Image (cartoon, coloured by chain):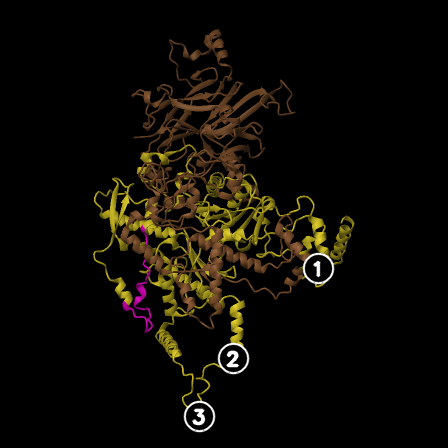
Chain colours: A brown, B yellow
Amino acid sequence: MAQPFPYTYYACDCYDSNGTSSTKRASQLLREAEEDERTFDPRSPRANYSLYPLEHLLYCEDCQQVRCPRCIIEETLNWYCPSCLFEVPSSVVKSDGNRCTRSCFSCPLCTSPMQTFSLDTTGESAPPFILECQYCRWSTLEIGIEFEKGQGIAAQLARLGNGGKHIPTNKERDKERERRKEIEGRKARDVLSPSTESTNTDADRDDEPPSHDDLFSNLTAFYKSQVDAQTPSNPFSSHDINFSSPSAYSRIMNLYSTTGSKKNKRSKPSAMREAASSLEGLTLHDPANEAAAIERIKKEGWGVTLSPAQKHAQINPNVRFVDQLRPLATLLCTKRSKRCRSCRQILTKPESKMTSTRYKIKLLALNHIPRLSIRALNATPPIPVASRPADSFDYNALKPGMPSHFLLHLSNPLFDPIKVTLATPSTTPGRVQSRVTILCPQFDVGANTDIWDDALSSSLSPMRRGSQLPDQAPQIEAGKIWDRGRNWTSVAVEIVPGFTDAVGSDGQNELEEDEDVLEIPIFVRIEYETDAGADERGLGDSRGSKGEQEKREEAFWTVVGVGRIKG
Amino acid sequence: MSTSGERKVSASLGRSVRGAAPRLADLASTPEAPRTPTLGRSVSSLFGSPGGSFRTDDDYVVIEVGARFVRAGFPGESTPRCTLAFDPDNQRRVGDYRQWDPECAQKRSNPNKGQDWGQEFELYRMDLSRVDLGVVEDKFERVMRDVYNKYFVLDTKPRRILLALPPKMPHPLMSTLLDVLFGGVQAPSITLMSSPVLSTVAAGLRSALVVDIGWAETLVTAVCEYREVHEQRTVRAGKLLSEEMAKVLNAALDEHVGYQEGDDISFEEAEEVLSRVGWCKSKPRSNRRTLYFPARTSPILEEFEDAVETPEPTMTIPLPKASPPSEITVPFATLAKPADNALFATETALNEFDDHELPLHHLIYRALLFLPMDVRRLCMSRIVITGGVSALPGLKSRILAELEALVQAKGWDPVRNYGTASARHEQILRQQRDARELRRQEGDDTITEPLDPDSPLPAGLRGHEEDSIDAKLAHVALRNGPPPASLAGGIVRGVETLGPWAGASLVAQQRIRGIVEIDRERYLQHGLQGASKEKEVSVVPQRQSMGPGVVRGAGERASWTLGVWA
């Protein structure tokens, strides 16, 4: 795993509870019932989707359950560009899309941010301007684009095609289409009396195939005209009567006007037809394009082509060569509040200010779920990597077959003492089977009281930490905890890492990725008594009156990554 | 308004109670004499109550789900907002950032043993016996969350979904996908459209033969008037192609110096090579000898093109993930071999293929052969080739050329082999063709004027009489009817399409409602079992549903169907 050892993942069990049972077959349900009794397998393909580091989890106080990213609903509060920190109003997001409309672009080759530079040699910032990537030095010069102004690059780029050509706007496209249609119509009328004039209009027609956008807008216009021709101006013939739209009103108003009834006497509409020309979006297959592409690949080689990742990042993914690339406008980021999926309570809500990273509401699992961690017994407590002594325990080289001791450390964020029960399968699932024994699976953890309470109480009763008297090294004993503090307890675990070469017996010699990682699923169950309604924070829970003690319990699977077996 | 409105309501109620249900036609034809449209008033007073609109403002999002990619965007846009692939990197645990680790970027990721080629790169496969639907759900859910939170960044307003799916999907798989869309993204309703039909729409056609060369299989669908009428499949598609490419590259690696045993090309590398420099010979070669060339087109031209270039062009492919990082140089022609082997199987005789692994051109030919003659006429000149592999340069031309050759050689004869009579059959065919050719040649110089006025030409040799009325009608048809270009048929012709996603975007933009429309509440109640058994549901609403006692709005239907997916 990419996380440094040792680590702990928490499993959110939402995946088998939120499915709609109606669609599940009986066999599936049966399998699920079995699964309830089975231990959690960190190697199952589904585990990747239910395991989270504790920091990524939220906690719904109403449901008293952990909430992972898939059992929450997110609501966007505001939009902003991560590179210019400009807040984008929602109306602009709707109309202009999810990308920054100012001058923020990232490189289409290496995705690092691009900067605007002036090509002017006099040192002043004067036109022409270009965008250049600071990392790989790709610039818009390579696709033949220069800008006249240094601001509002996005708007300029929308009008500039690669090679400095002009990209028509939708309106211009419509106009151009009308013009050409007229020419064609004239030609069609001239069919019986062919004239020489029609040939030269052919000549000024595009010598290159229409672009993806051109075709799409042609098709759109074609279908619109066809659908309009199909829909009579009568309000009741169309099946969706929608009184909220102005067009419906106009149709109703048409009824009352005298012209409306005359229109309907038109002969029956002709059937919707197919597109007939490229102005209507029809493109016939042209082998010449493909042949040209092959020639180009043959001549210019690997370097002119694009990798799949570069292609998919493009707005139009149907590109093949480097000179078809476009700079990528930065995707907008959002600030989102999160709600519990089942009770709709807000779990987090960030401050709406762009530069603020604070939250108005933040219900983290960190504050409600005990934190479980593991470390080698003889290792010093986790300290920064840089200062770690050289002889410290190497988690990346566990010796197979050598029993070694680890400490499970459980710290309690709650204000009530908890009773903890740990359970783990005696051998880890998977092909590399390691034996695991938790020496003291049941123990108590103190409340997360004020830090001074701890100091005071420990001074009053120093004997509480029985096992850690200075002159007596703690013993590893079954049924006894290793050590405890104010709100934490640690217990010893004995682990015998399995043999990785034993895997070869079933014919498949090689280990799969991460199969040599020793991960232990541990089931944690905690029980505690708390003031009912104490942490409801006056939300009006009528069940428990003040002062009444309520018993609560929580249970979840965790996965502890101990290290990598080597040997 | 109130009293009169009331009266009108009761009047209309009375009418429907009496059983004289007014037909839609009554509504459609506006009477000659101007009078108050009674029903109009009553309808508005009926439904004018809260909200007024019983179809909530239809905001759609358009999603296309394929085996390896999800495309999603908004209607009216020419390209999707995002095209997301399923790859192992985005299927890792949260907090596992190893893909950004520079060390890991240098390493080749070995596929897990026991998995098929590229299995971890796909969302689903049609054979559900080896698919864990739970994993499919997890993968799809994560991707959809990404789509909505990263690329759509919408407000919370629920939006309908137009979902483009391949036709014929296993129901458990469909309900898994729908579960995610209804549960995870809370769509109020989902319209399903089959991707061949959408490809047809995106090509500007109504009928087409859609050849979707996808990941696991190639699907040939004949679409006639926006309906799937016939379907054929083969496994010769992207997966086989990339496997072949890996074989070619491995063979090249073997000869490379510094090659270590077992250091094979990974899936990503094969994919990248294929999509960057893979190509396909656009001229069929294998059946050159059997191909019949009409006298006018000389085969010399093609022979010339096949001449070996000197020096042989090569391609240098960098392999930065090999250990040690290296470059291999392969002849350019070998990069066209995978397509030849995987898609056309030029080396194998036709009788050795199983039904599920026909080469593409034979598959298309067979699909056309199955069609009725009139549909075939439409479909053969509207061959739409789409799908991820179709971007391979030269492939479309090759398919069309191969098909053309097949049609020329065999005609539309369902008999594949005449046995001992085959020689005779060939002869008949050749004679027919020669006769046609001859006729066409003579067509240019027909005798219009009888040379000898005394002995008129026999009627059989005379040209048609020119009827002035016919000419006029033709002229009128030309002006008012569809342009002749849209009626083309009978020749093998390829038409380009913008792809299913663009088609879905067009459909959603025109607010065309699909046959298969699944309502959230109904789906959550009954699942896919709630669909009625009929394949077709009338899109034109029944008059009865407009009655006063009906709670449902006109936008909803009494029952829903699964259409082609049923």
Residue B389 x %, y %: 38, 53
Q: Are marks 1 and 3 on the same chain?
A: yes
Disc 3 marks which residue?
B454
Q: Residue B22's mark? A: 1
Residue A236 x %, y %: 65, 56
- For the N terminus of chain A, the quadrant is top left
User: Which amino acid type is shown beneath numbered disc 3?
Assistant: Asp
Q: Are marks 3 and 2 on the same chain?
A: yes
Which corner quadrant of the image does residue A205 belong to?
Answer: bottom left
Q: CA distance from mark 2 to mark 1?
A: 47 Å
User: Which amino acid type is shown beneath numbered disc 2?
Assistant: Asp
User: What is the magenta segment's predominant secondary structure?
Assistant: loop
Above or below for B497 versus A42: below
User: Which amino acid type is shown beneath numbered disc 1?
Assistant: Pro
Label whose residue precedes the other's in the sequence (3 or 2): 3
1 vs 3, front mark: 3
The answer to whether residue B287 is magenta is yes
Which corner quadrant of the image does residue A119 belong to?
Answer: top left
Q: Residue B467's mark? A: 2
* Closer to the camera in the image, A316 or B113: A316
Range of magenta residues? B277-300
* Element at label 1: loop
Q: Which chain is home to disc 3?
A: B
Q: Residue A107's mark? A: none
Using a 10 Å C-alpha cutoff, classify the residue at mark 2 as few (fewer than 14 neighbours), some (14 to 19) or many (20 or more).
few
